[in-house]
Image (cartoon, helix red, strand yellow):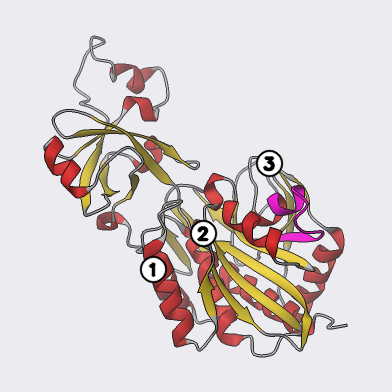
Amino acid sequence: MLEFDRLFQTIAELVMLYSPSGVESEINQGLMEKFAALGVNAWIDRADNVIALIPGRNRQKSIAITAHKDEIGAIVKTIGSQGRVEVRKLGGAFPWVYGEGVVDLLGDNHTISGILSFGSRHVSHESPQKAQQEDVSLKWEDVWIETKCTTEELAEAGIRPGTRMVVSKHRKQPIRLKDWIGSYTLDNKASVAILLGLAECLTEPAVNVYLVASAKEEVGAIGALYFSQRQPLDALIALEICPLAPEYPIADGENPVLLVQDGYGIYDEGLNRELRVAADRAGVQVQLATISGFGSDASIAMKFGHVARAACLAFPTQNTHGFEIAHLGAIDNCALILKAYCDELSDE
C-alpha cells in the first residue's frame, strides 16, 4: 500500500517525537497535524488518546484499530548531588539495552540531556560496578544520569521526581537495512504509521472505523481501556510488534503475525478467521502464534470485559524493547490486511 521509502520516512518522523508514557504531548501535536493534513476528523480525549474517525456506510456499528503511541523509558526517582539523577523503569525498559549514552530528561520547562552512566571499567572488586562485569545483570538501581548541572539548574529546568527519561534524539534516528528498518520505539511508532496509512486510504468502510493512537499502553493499556469502556465496539484490533525468539515459530520477513493467545488470554477465533479471510483477499500470508510475556490493547480490553471480540495483528520484530528491527513489508502488509477487512466487513 505504501512505498517503502515513504513508509520509512513516516516512521522516522514519528520515532523522533517524544512520547514516554504519560508525557505524550509532542507526538499528539504531530499526529493532529498529520490527520488534519489528510482531512480526517480527529480529536484528543480525556485519557490523552488521539482518535480519528472514518465514518462507515453503517453509522450504527463501529470497530476500533489501536496502535499505542507511548514509548518505554524511565522516570526520575531522586535528584542527587553533583548533577546526578537516579531513575527507575517506565514500562519494560532495561538499562543494559540502552547502554551508556545520551538520554533526555523532559523537564517541565526545558529538556536536559545527560549521560546514562554505569561507572568505570578499570576497577577492582572494591568498586560496586565490578559485580556487573562478572556476576549479575545491570539494574536501574546501579546506574545514574550524569548531567553536570547544579541542583538549582535542574530545578529551573523542571527536572523533578516523576520527570520522564527517554533515549535522546541525538541517537534515535532510524537506519535502513535493505527492506528492514532498525530503530528505537518501533514499538509502537511503526504501528502508528499504519494508522496514518489507513486514514489516507479508507474512504467509505462498511462500518465506522476509529483509528486510535492509544496512550499509556506500556503502563497498563490505560488509554485503550478508557476508550473501549466508553465507546461501544463490535471489534477491537490492536496493531503491535511481535517478538522474534527461538521459542516462537515466527519467521522474520514480510509476513505479519496474527496472535491466537498472549499473556492476558486468548483472542477471538471468529475475528481472527475474518482477518485471515481479509489477508487472503489482500494476497498476504499471515503467521499464527501464541506468545507469553506480552499483552496488547486488545487482549487487555477483552480480559476486562470492555469488548467481546478482540484481535492483535503484528509485525515480526527483533530486539523488542531495544533497538528494534522489522521488515517494512510486514508493516505495510498489516495495513493491506486491515484495509481489506474494513472495506469488505458486513455492514448489516
Which percent across, then down, holds residue 296?
Answer: 64, 52
Q: Indicate which disc residue 12 carries.
A: 1
Q: What residue appears at the point 48 percent right and 80 percent down from the top-left corner?
A: 35
- Label 2 neighbourhood size at 10 Å, few (<14), some (14-19), many (20+)? many
Q: Amino acid at mark 1?
A: Ala
Q: Which residues are magenta?
A: 300-314
Q: Is residue 14 above or below residue 161?
A: below
Pick the residue in front: 220 or 45. Answer: 45
- Which residue in the structure is indicated by mark 3? 292
Callout in the foreground (2, 3)? 2
Pick the front one: 233 or 114: 233
Q: Quadrant of the N terminus?
A: bottom right
Q: Position of residue 171 (x, y in %)?
A: 28, 55
**Nearest to N terminus: mark 1 or mark 2:** 1
Q: The residue tagged with tag 2: helix, strand or loop? A: helix
Task: For marks 1 and 2, give the CA distance.
Answer: 12 Å
In the displayed structure, 312 sits above or below 159; it is: below
- Image position, residue 99 (x, y; %): 32, 39
What's the amino acid at mark 3? Ser
Mark 2 vs 3, N-terminal side: 2
Q: Amino acid at mark 2?
A: Asn
- Where disc 1 sits, the SS reads helix
Q: Residue at horizontal 39%, vertical 62%? A: 25
Does the magenta-highlighted stretch encompass residue 179?
no
Work out whether 44 lies above or below 126. Answer: below
- Numbered badge on residue 221: none
Residue 149 appearing in the image = no
Distance (Cα) linking label 3 and label 1? 29 Å
